[in-house]
Amino acid sequence: MEILDVRSDEFRAYGDVLEGMDVAELLQVLDTTTPCPDDGTVYVPSDPALEKLSVHKIISDHVFGGMPVQIGYCNGTNTKLNCLEWHRGSELNVSSESFVLLLAKMEDFVGRKLDSSSVKAFRVPAGVPVLVYETTLHYAPCGHFRVIVALPEGTNTDKPEIKDSVSCDALLWARNKWLIAHPDSSEAKQGAYVGISGENIDIKNDL
């Protein structure tokens, strides 16, 4: 699979590269205090050690326009697509090492189905903060990684207790997290909505 760079023209429809933000302290704490499994991934929506840093207010003010935000991380090893998710609000990612994001556009999600052939791969260079737009479907990074994940406060925490009454309710997997799964994924086996058809993309040989 071709892996594009986030500074390429193709990425403009999916997100934005943020310039001028000092993330050195954020990445230093991420790399020295958080676990990074060699098999699978670990995701923590909100980490107090990251959120007490001065960059927390910078991210809140300059990236999210003054909205309350959480800073957590997704660490580990992954090469597969498996699922795609989206939120009401964009997502900030940055790492001290390069990693790959598998992304799709909301406009390709038609009839509550998305063919994996519409997914593109983008490499994020080390130290480069990227903002993944609200309209971009994404999931776990690929490679061996420690990645900062900043989102509107409360995202990816406990799912609200609601009865399915709106068309998108069946896709709600956690708070402010709508998800579609490939039938081969563990999430599908756990009851996630199966909305990805085609190949379950694996970029192991492309990294």
Image (cartoon, rainbow, N blue to C red):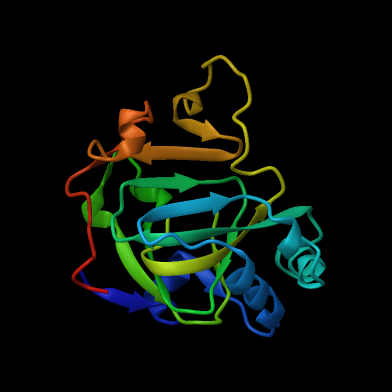
Residue 170 higher or lower than 80, as above or below: above
Please tell me which residue is depicted at 36% across the width and 36% down the height of the picture: 187
As drawn, is 76 to the left or to the right of 176? left
| 12 or 32: nearer the viewer | 32
Please indicate, yes or no, whether residue 135 appears anywhere in the rendered image. Answer: no
As drawn, is 58 to the left or to the right of 172? right
The quarter of the image holding the N terminus is bottom left
Residue 190 higher or lower than 24, as above or below: above
Residue 3 percent coordinates (x, y): 29, 74
| 113 or 56: nearer the viewer | 56
Res 159 quadrant in image: top right
Residue 188 higher or lower than 199, as above or below: above
Please tell me which residue is depicted at 31% across the width and 47% down the height of the picture: 82
Badge count: 0
Please tell me which residue is depicted at 22% across the width and 73% down the height of the picture: 206
| 136 or 95: nearer the viewer | 95
Please indicate, yes or no, whether residue 42 appears anywhere in the rendered image. Answer: yes
Res 79 quadrant in image: bottom left
Please tell me which residue is depicted at 49% across the width and 61% down the height of the picture: 75
Residue 165 percent coordinates (x, y): 53, 16
Residue 50 percent coordinates (x, y): 72, 64
The quarter of the image holding the C terminus is bottom left
Residue 118 percent coordinates (x, y): 27, 56
As drawn, is 149 to the left or to the right of 198? right
